[in-house]
Image (tube, helix red, strand yellow):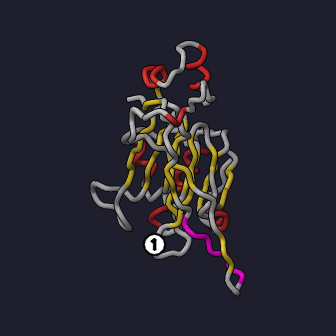
Amino acid sequence: MDLSVFFAGTAGSIPTARRGLPALLVRRGGDRILFDCGEGTQRQLVQSVGLTELTEVFLTHYHADHWLGLPGLLKTFDLRARERPLAIHGPPGLRELLTLALRAAGRVRYQLDLIELAPGDLLERDGYKIAPVPVAHRVSNALGYVIYEDERPGEFDPDTATALGVVPGPEFGQLQRGETVRGVRPEQAPSTNQNRHSWRPLDRRVRRDRNRQTHIRSPKLCRTQPRRLFRSRQ
């Protein structure tokens, strides 16, 4: 599946002549996901890759340089007669922020789904996942986002399977489906590519203090073991 990342803005706090305020567009298959939307983001997109119909928007935190371009972008979609709902994600406080922003900019006629996230949440998508993680910033509820694809078996290695005693034919198909054949499990054979890993978040851990405030520790990331009868596609 195709995946590309376009940096629409990389400046901090104030724009420069050559750099816009923070905004990053991820294109994954047919999905178009915008992370942050600083002032001038839609113009940066119009004069570069084009202002596409976004699938989702994710905000990392609510300093103005990271979201001030969003009300204008939402209004542009409205003027273009957008009908498809748009999901906007962010830390707690998102609903209050967008309520105030659209009170000034004006309502839109398409549906906005405002989804507040916390570290440890997991968003399932078609073939990949998005996980919010805590980051160190001047505000306490800033988030980063991890995008990782679902594990894929890669390209089957018939030579390794044959050397282990598996008979070519239907038994190869059984192994490709993750079944054990003639006592051989997919993970038993040496991997033809030891560097292939997929990532997944562990469950979040939550503790409460005496004031009953919830503190969520960073979800750890771990590597899963590769299926050793398969090699990565180049």
Residue 159, how many percent across, how many down? 43, 21
Kindly give the residue lying farthest to the left in the view shown: 17
Between residues 64 and 176, which one lies in front from this camera angle? Answer: 176
Which residue does the image show at 47% across and 20% down from the upper left?
A: 162
* Position of 13 relative to 50 (above/below): below
Q: Which portion, as a residue range, is magenta?
A: 212-218
Where is residue 125? Give x, y as percent: 61, 42
Q: Give the number of marks.
A: 1
Q: State whether residue 155 is above or below residue 70.
A: above
Percent coordinates x, y for residue 66 in the rendering: 47, 62
* Quadrant (top left/top right/bottom left/bottom right) for the C terminus: top left
Report the residue that reaches farthest toward the top. Answer: 169
- Residue identified by numbered label 1: 137
Residue 45 shows in this picture? yes
**Above or below: residue 215 compared with residue 58:** below
Closer to the camera, 144 or 38? 144
Residue occupying the point 63% across, 58% down: 121
Q: Is residue 104 visible?
A: no
Q: Quadrant of residue 107?
A: bottom right
Residue 215 lies within the magenta run = yes
- Out of 217 and 103, give the one closest to the viewer: 217
Q: Residue at x 56, y 42 (%)?
A: 128
Judged from the image, the secondary structure of the residue bearing numbered disc 1 is loop
Position in image of residue 179 (x %, y %):
63, 29
Does the magenta segment cover residue 128? no
In the picture, measured across the screen, residue 182 lies left or right of residue 212, that is left
Location of residue 106 by image quarter: bottom right
Local crowd size for mark 1, using a 10 Å CA cut-off: few (<14), some (14–19), many (≥20)? few
Amino acid type indicated by mark 1: His
